[in-house]
Amino acid sequence: MDPIYLDYAATTPVRAEVRAAMEPYLDQRFGNPSSTHRWGREAQAALEESRSRIAEVLGARRREIVFVRGGTESDNLAILGRADHLDAEGACPHVVTCATEHKAVLDTVRAVERRGGRATVLDVDHRGTLSLDALDAALAEAPCVASLMWVNNEVGVVHPMAEIAARTRARGVPLHSDAVQAVGKVRVRVDEVAVDVLSLSGHKLHGPKGTGALFVREGTELHARIHGGGQEMGLRPGTQDVAGAVGLAEAVELAVAEQQDTAARLTSLRELLEGRLRATVPGLRIHGHGAPRAPHVLNVGVPEVDPELLLVSLDMAGLAVSGGSACSSGGTGGSHVLQALYGAAPVPAAIRFSFARETTVEEVERAADVTLATLRRLAPRAVAT
Ligand SMILES: Cc1ncc(COP(=O)(O)O)c(C=O)c1O
């Protein structure tokens, strides 16, 4: 059987248009954008055009887009950069975040704590949604930044960003949102939703790996994390990856332009797979069920099966999925996201299927067949005959 890749929330292939846009900047137009000669000016023009294109589709201004090296770096710069700013002003940083954030946020918040700052980590309910009342209470303690993701990478739950942003804005608390899984999947506009800092990553939307951006709303003070030649408005020094920036801009622009069509198509694929699995596995849990969910992720809990064995067996049967995020793949035992949904209750084996523009109905149907055949073998009592 041809293998099936349904792990697009982990990463996506670079699309042809992105590769074509990048190619000239790898050799012919290789200049350093900080050089003043024609090679430099050409590179600088491409970099600034890329910045404008990303700004335009997000509803931002050109100078509000900072090129960084991926989602993790973007999250780190947002949170530590904000905490450092507060530190410099002599105040104790306090970060408000949520238990289901990506490790790039949670571990960064832990780093703030290790340096003497404070953190409030909000719980979620069994669907993966946070309580806005709990958020209000945390905001009353005057945090230096709230960091709340737009779309969860493991279960696909969409946070109510407009309501969250209205609350942080009312309290004058800067809001960072990790939108790595949101851009191109749901509508993300910083002129409609009052987020102050926003992270995105190229490789989740058919752009190159190691590329990313941070939107920093004008007037939001951040400190740089690394020091050097002052590039990227001083926030991310180091010679810019012009080809990467061009590729990122192309990928983001296409993803945003196609977002509505993509969402409609991927939602129907997600529903197809969910329906097939539900019909045959009576005890199946749909993680995030009842909460708004992004179109590209379906995360299910399967009773009576060993999580490691399940993922290995699916892989051997030709189906590439994950048990949680790519960083906790190989098992669901370590998923802090599912643990947050289940609280004290035991977490079942989970499968995260994730889709992208290349996913077909035929692949989804085969994925359902492979999953059901594997479950019949590993957990016969869980599957209806
Ligand atoms: C929600 C979220 N945030 C951050 C990241 C990290 O992004 P990157 O792999 O570009 O560092 C990921 C990727 O797994 C993610 O899904």
Image: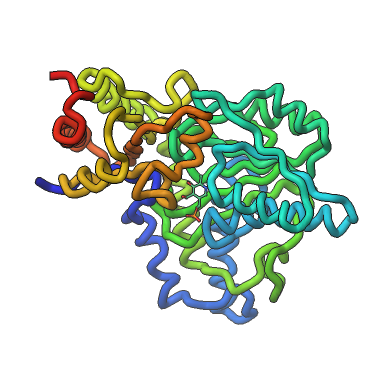
* Residue farthest to the bottom, as pictured: 37
Please name the residue shown 54% across and 62% down the image: 69
The image quadrant of residue 348 is top left
Name the spot of residue 60 as percent of width and height, x first. 64, 44
Q: Quadrant of residue 97?
A: top right
Rendered residue at 72%/54% (across/down): 112
Is 256 positioned to the left or the right of 191 in the image?
A: left
Please identify the quadrant where the C terminus is shown: top left
* Residue 351 relative to residue 25: left or right: left
Image quadrant where residue 89 sits: bottom right
Task: Please provide percent x and percent y for residue 291.
Answer: 49, 22
Q: Is residue 5 left or right of residue 130?
A: left
Q: Position of residue 34 (x, y in %)?
A: 63, 75
Q: Is residue 5 visible?
A: no
Q: Is residue 150 left or right of residue 282?
A: right
Q: Can residue 335 be seen from the camera position used here? A: yes
Examine the rendered structure and indicate whether residue 73 appears above or below residue 220. below
Q: Which colour style is shown?
A: rainbow
For the point 66% across and 25% down, which residue is it? 163
Viewer-proximal residue among 275 and 312: 312
Residue at the extreme right? 90
Number of callouts in the render? 0
Q: Which residue is painted at 66% across and 42% down in the image? A: 147
Residue 122 rendering spot, x and y as whole percentages: 65, 33
Nearer the observer, 324 or 147: 324
Query: Height in image: 62 above or below 168?
Result: below
Q: Nearer the viewer, residue 10 or 43?
A: 10
